[in-house]
């Protein structure tokens, strides 16, 4: 398990969540930025997208012609598996690693083309390059560059990050690991419940 604690449809509204910044939560360590999703809606990274939630994170750019489309195809299958298995509430977050090019409009066209635009709890996200860069560094999704350097979109991580911010349980798995493995890991690591309930189960 990887320790990450150191660092819809129209009209969709985020559900009430636990407050951001709860002790030990990964969300408390994320930059306080506002991104925009593929529907051009503002999303606060901490409060709206991660705090207290069960999430699966991926990273791509729309000009990628090989690995990224395969990842989206695979995640569609994972999403359907989780729904079929009664996984409860969760959110898929796909971050562009090329925000200078990937506008919300381009992300929407990409999601439509890849058959992923109709999932209410799956958001493709972009924003101001400096803020997106801070997000990617917080998730360790890109290799560090020298000050003033340009990050190479093609050098982003091929890992998926998944977990439950409410229980502080997180892990990562290669995007190409296979849909069954990804779904099973999500169900195990990001299982619902409060931190207290999780600790109680561990003590049993």
Image (tube, rainbow, N blue to C red):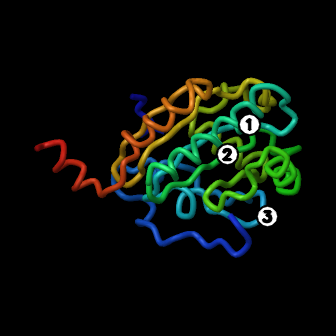
Mark 1 and mark 2 in contact? Answer it, CB < 8 Å. Answer: yes
Local crowd size for mark 3, using a 10 Å CA cut-off: few (<14), some (14–19), many (≥20): some
Using the numbered discs, state the Cα–Cα distance from disc 3 to disc 1 in whole angstroms. Answer: 18 Å
Q: Nearer the viewer, residue 33 or 35?
A: 35
Residue drawn at (20%, 48%) of the image: 199
Tag 1 secondary structure: strand
Using the numbered discs, state the Cα–Cα distance from disc 1 to disc 2 in whole angstroms. Answer: 7 Å
| Residue indicated by mark 2 | 94
| Residue indicated by mark 3 | 40
Placement of the N terminus among the 4 image quadrants: top left
Left or right of 164: which side holds 79? right
**Which is nearer the N-term, disc 3 or disc 2?**
3
Question: Is residue 172 depicted above or below 84 in this figure?
Answer: above
Mark number displayed over residue 60? 1
Mark number displayed over residue 21? none
What x and y, as percent, mark residue 157?
A: 65, 27
Local crowd size for mark 2, using a 10 Å CA cut-off: few (<14), some (14–19), many (≥20): many
Tag 2 secondary structure: strand
């Amino acid at each position: 398990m990887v320790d990450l604690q150191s660092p819809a449809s129209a009209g969709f509204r985020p559900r009430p969540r636990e407050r951001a910044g709860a002790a030990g939560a990964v969300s408390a360590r994320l930059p306080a930025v506002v991104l925009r999703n593929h529907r051009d809606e503002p999303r606060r990274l901490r409060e709206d997208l991660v705090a207290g939630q069960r999430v699966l994170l991926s990273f791509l750019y729309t000009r990628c012609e090989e690995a990224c489309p395969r990842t989206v195809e695979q995640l569609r299958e994972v999403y359907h598996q989780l729904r079929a298995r009664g996984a409860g509430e969760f959110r898929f977050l796909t971050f562009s690693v090329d925000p200078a090019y990937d506008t919300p409009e381009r992300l929407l066209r990409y999601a439509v083309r890849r058959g992923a635009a109709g999932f209410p709890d799956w958001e493709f996200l972009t924003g101001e390059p400096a803020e997106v860069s801070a997000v990617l560094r917080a998730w360790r999704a890109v290799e560090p560059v020298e000050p003033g350097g340009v990050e190479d979109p093609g050098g982003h991580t091929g890992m998926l990050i998944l977990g439950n911010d409410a229980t502080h349980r997180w892990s990562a798995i290669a995007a190409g690991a296979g849909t069954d493995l990804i779904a099973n890991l999500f169900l195990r690591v990001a299982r619902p419940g409060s931190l207290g309930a999780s600790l109680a189960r561990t003590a049993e």
